[in-house]
Each structure stands twice: as C-alpha cells, then as structure tokens.
Amino acid sequence: MTLKIVLDPDSGAAPYEQLRTQISELARSGALPVGFRLPTVRGFAEELGLAANTVAKAYRVLEADGVIETRGRNGTFIAPAGEAADRHAAAAAREYAEQARRLGLSRAEALALAEDAVRAAYPER
C-alpha cells in the first residue's frame, strides 16, 4: 500500500495542516489501516518536497490527536484512532458547552455558534 498525499500550493492551508488533514482522514476512513507504518519524517519530507520540520510538526499534531503513535526506533504507525478522536472531540465539545454557558449564551446561541464553526472547518467540496 502506498500513501497518496497531494499538497496544493495554492491552498490557504499550511502544508503541515494539509498533510495532517489528509492522514487523519485516511486513517478515520480506514484507507490507512491501524498499524500501517508511515514513512520516516526525513523520507516523507523528501518525497513530498517539504522541510523535515514541516512533516515533523504534522506528525506531532497527529500523535497528540491520537491518530498516530510513535514506537521509538520501530517507526510511526496509524493508531486505533477512532475512539481516541471521538474522546478528544467529545471533550472539546463539553469544554465549549461549559464555557458558552458560563458566558451566558442561550442553548440556541451556543448551538448556532458551534454550527458556524463546524461549517467553516468543513467547507463544501
């Protein structure tokens, strides 16, 4: 299996964010199965024509999100991320709801703002 990543230089998103998004989507869809070994930072950077720090930043964010796991010298692998991603998203949603309530927003106002944020984060393709 080959890892197909396409970076758009005309995109408004930074290259590390494009890389992070694509790997995350591939992992969540199952196109990259749990246990799939990702390329090394240097190798992937060379393949994509990016700086190693750019790939390393994407890997750090993916690891913090629970999408990938680093096993020391053995490499970096797709983690069983579905549950971890759901837990992170649920925690962020709870934190948002609590803060909106503390700010005095009504339930309808909080939901409308959350919907606007989701719409902005998931543009129509």
Image (tube, rainbow, N blue to C red):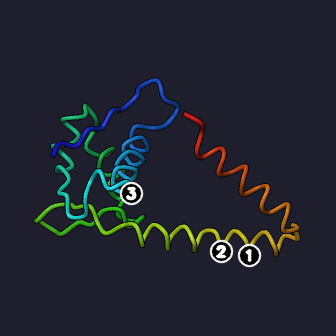
Please tell me whether mark 3 sits on a helix, a strand or a loop: helix
Q: Is residue 60 left or right of residue 72?
A: right
Tag count in the figure? Answer: 3
What distance separates the C-alpha of mark 2 from that of mark 1?
Answer: 6 Å
Give the residue type that dot 3 points to. Arg
Q: Is residue 113 left or right of residue 125?
A: right
- Residue extending farthest front: 30
Give the residue type that dot 1 points to. Glu
Q: Indicate the position of residue 47 as horizontal and vertical percent values.
A: 19, 35
- Residue extending farthest left: 74
Q: Indicate the position of residue 69 as horizontal and vertical percent values.
A: 27, 66
Q: Nearer the viewer, residue 21 or 82?
A: 82
Please tell me whether mark 1 sits on a helix, a strand or a loop: helix
What distance separates the C-alpha of mark 3 from that of mark 2?
Answer: 22 Å
* Residue count near mark 1 (Cα–Cα under 10 Å), binned few <14, some 14–19, many ≥20: few
Q: Which quadrant would residue 29 be assigned to in this image?
A: bottom left
**Label number found at residue 98:** 1
Q: Do callouts 2 and 1 mark residues in contact (Cβ within 8 Å)?
A: yes
**Label number found at residue 94:** 2
Q: In which quarter of the image is the C terminus?
A: top right
* Residue count near mark 2 (Cα–Cα under 10 Å), binned few <14, some 14–19, many ≥20: few
Q: Indicate the position of residue 2 as horizontal and vertical percent values.
A: 17, 42
> In terms of sequence position, does the residue under pointer 1 or pointer 3 come before the other?
3
Q: Indicate the position of residue 34 as horizontal and vertical percent values.
A: 25, 64
Which residue is denoted by mark 3 in the rendering?
Answer: 28
Viewer-nearest of labels 3 and 2? 3
